[in-house]
Image (spheres, rainbow, N blue to C red):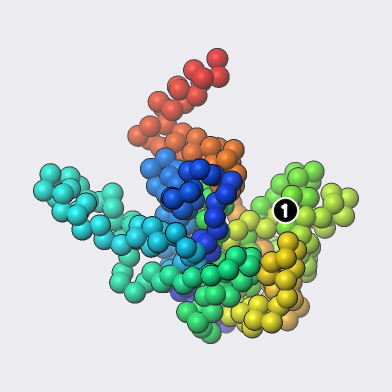
Amino acid sequence: MSFKPIRKAVFPVAGLGTRFLPATKVVPKELLPVVDRPLIQYAVEEAREAGIEQLILVTGRGKTGIVEHFDIAFELEKTMTERGKDLAILEPTRATPGDVIAVRQQVPLGLGHAIWCARAIVGDEPFAIFLPDELMVAKEGGTGCMKQMVEAYDEVGGNLISVLEVPMEQVSSYGVIDPGESRGALTEVRGLVEKPPVAEAPSNKIVSGRYILQPEVMRVLETQGKGAGGEIQLTDAMAKMIGTQPFHAVTFDGNRYDCGSKVGFVEATLAIALSRPDMGAEVRAIALDLLK
């Protein structure tokens, strides 16, 4: 059986980034660099690796810099060319005209509302969702998280979420799946539980910021009321779709860094720097020196 391909991805990037103030007073959090690439670029490159063609940025006021990052910087490129500098470093920031689309989330009503704001562009196609705060890094020689999910989607269709296994004592900080039958990295999802007490958690598989959803989720979000925190929650909409459409989780074979927190951001920066052949040895030496 063949399924509609995943061509579109939604990036909800309208958040205020208050945990990173004052750095994010003017600069969007998604443009803060992990070594030398902004956070949003890692997510976009992961999307492109998975064959996604159209990037839908759900932005807010003060976030135009994210769109500009994927535009051509004429003055910069002209100056670099005149000085004989290689422009290859800018290649990942280029986008085919029409393939980066920005829509506004005018009121901060939650993740579900942000996704719903992209409904006209998503149309009647299945689509991916990337939460750029969650930096998903493939193992050396491996494939990215979304590529692993698209490969699973091509096999089972329906809806998929990325999950990671964490120590049981940590589950109360995350959304957790109620698992059904498992086959390799693929697990049937029977339910979703948000931040359960450890004793009541149905598993240690936490939802981790990557989704493939069918367009019907937009119809659910259309009429959905506010949930936890007074916001329209994507988790609530997904829970309503379980049982009506195939729903699976893919356990990501790679590393996740929570760049929504300062400590996680520092961890990601250190991990990426250590893995870089052009600087890893020097960074390791610096880290060891600091730990003395």
- Along the line of sight, which residue is nearer the eye, 55 or 190? 55
Q: Residue at x 73, y 81 (%)?
A: 244
Residue under label 1, please give it: 174
Drawn side of residue 248 relative to residue 35, left or right: right
Instruction: Quadrant for the N terminus, please.
Output: bottom right
Query: Within 10 angstroms of label 1, few (less than 14), some, or many (20 or more) residues?
Result: some
Drawn side of residue 160 relative to residue 140, left or right: right
- Along the line of sight, which residue is nearer the eye, 55 or 275? 55
Q: Is residue 234 above or below residue 83?
A: below
Q: Position of residue 198 (x, y in %)?
A: 84, 49
Q: Residue at x 44, y 59 (%)?
A: 62
Instruction: Quadrant for the C terminus, please.
Output: top right
Q: Is residue 280 above or below residue 81?
A: above
Is residue 42 visible in the rendered image? The answer is no
Q: Position of residue 16 (x, y in %)?
A: 54, 55
Q: Residue furthest right?
A: 199
In the rendered structure, which amino acid carries the disc numbered 1?
Tyr
Q: Residue at x 42, y 40 (%)?
A: 35
Q: Is residue 42 above or below residue 20?
A: below
Q: Residue at x 46, y 72 (%)?
A: 103
Q: Is residue 200 above or below residue 35?
A: below
